[in-house]
Image (tube, rainbow, N blue to C red):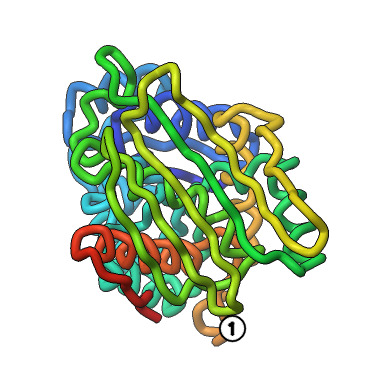
Amino acid sequence: MGLRFGLFGTGYWAEETQGAALAAHPDAELVGVWGRDPAKAGRIAHRYGVRPYADVDALIGDVDAVAIALPPDVQVGIAIRAAEAGRHLLLDKPLSFTVEDADRIVALVAERRLASVVLFTHRFYANVAAFVSQLAATGGWHGCRALMFASILQPGGPYASSAWRRERGGLWDIAPHFLSLALPVLGPVAEVAAMEGPRATTHVLFRHENGAVSNLAVTLDAPPAASAFETAFHGERGMAVVPPPDASQLEACGVAIGQLAAAASTAPDRAAGAAAPEHPCDVRLGREVVAVISAAARARDTGRTAQVAV
């Protein structure tokens, strides 16, 4: 029997990626589904042959781990309740909308000695993960530039009705993917400057603590003909372009589930006093990303550079 999971969420990502990956994974057992729309929860539960739950805590009580695919402000409350109950966490990015909420989750995970994984999808593609590890090991990188132009708000698309994505934009939805690649290679960000361009594009400069400087242009509302995803590091060894993924998002989610299950299997007994198992994409990285994005949002909105909360 695998790690027993409860799925929280009924949107496209919850059903087609997290739910499908959990149902198919040999190290996981999907137990039930909860959602803010009971009818959708019932339909998804029926699709995967599990029980729909009307109560959050009832589902938390029946599982070993939770998989959450909900807006960040909703995710926070469920993640905290699950961590307080001693459940391992498979969370979506961004971890939260505030550093304070992220800090609460990080503290609970450490206190309860839980395993956690945040779905920074690119880090779970084998070729991209190997690329990041190699660059981090070699060092000598001066910065990174990235263009992340998505066009996901078009009518009829799976995310067209996502209210939080429309309100918060690409800075919160896509920039976390960029940071999940840049931070392991270039180190923590100290200071951020940002401004807004056409079609809700945010242009950001990140100054890393080691002096490296990265720049990102990101939007969810690019013209379809201008959609593009390009990320390249530059330094003493020249240019290094992040390769395109060698797998699907569903497969990447499956890798994340397997890694969480492995970490959970080695999680120490709470009475033993050992530290929680660490994962390169756990809630600590999630919190770091929230701090950087929060600073970028402040910089964009005030027209002033912003320091990153440590």
Q: Position of residue 91 (x, y in %)?
A: 42, 51
Q: Position of residue 253 (x, y in %)?
A: 55, 38
Residue at point 30% right, 64% down?
A: 294
Quarter holding residue 234: bottom right
- The quadrant in which the C terminus is found is bottom left
Graded by Cα atoms within 10 Å as few (under 14), some (14 to 19) or many (20 or more), the crowding at tag 1 reads: few
Q: Is residue 92 above or below residue 246?
A: below
Residue at point 26% right, 73% down?
A: 100
Residue 198 shows in the view: yes
* Relative horizontal placement of residue 175, taking residue 182 as reference (left or right): left
- The quadrant in which the N terminus is found is top right
* Relative horizontal placement of residue 284, taking residue 122 as reference (left or right): left
Q: Position of residue 176 (x, y in %)?
A: 44, 52
Q: Position of residue 117 (x, y in %)?
A: 52, 55
Residue at point 34% right, 58% down?
A: 194
Residue 82 shows in the view: no
Q: Is residue 125 above or below residue 93?
A: above
Q: Is residue 41 above or below residue 132?
A: above
Q: Is residue 283 above or below residue 3?
A: below
- In the displayed orientation, state which residue is furthest to the top: 156
Quarter holding residue 257: top right
Q: How many marks?
A: 1
**What residue would you read off at disc 1?**
274
Residue at point 50% right, 40% down?
A: 147
Viewer-proximal residue among 217 and 293: 217
- In the displayed orientation, state which residue is furthest to the bottom: 273
* Relative horizontal placement of residue 143, taking residue 140 as reference (left or right): left
Q: Amino acid at mark 1?
A: Ala
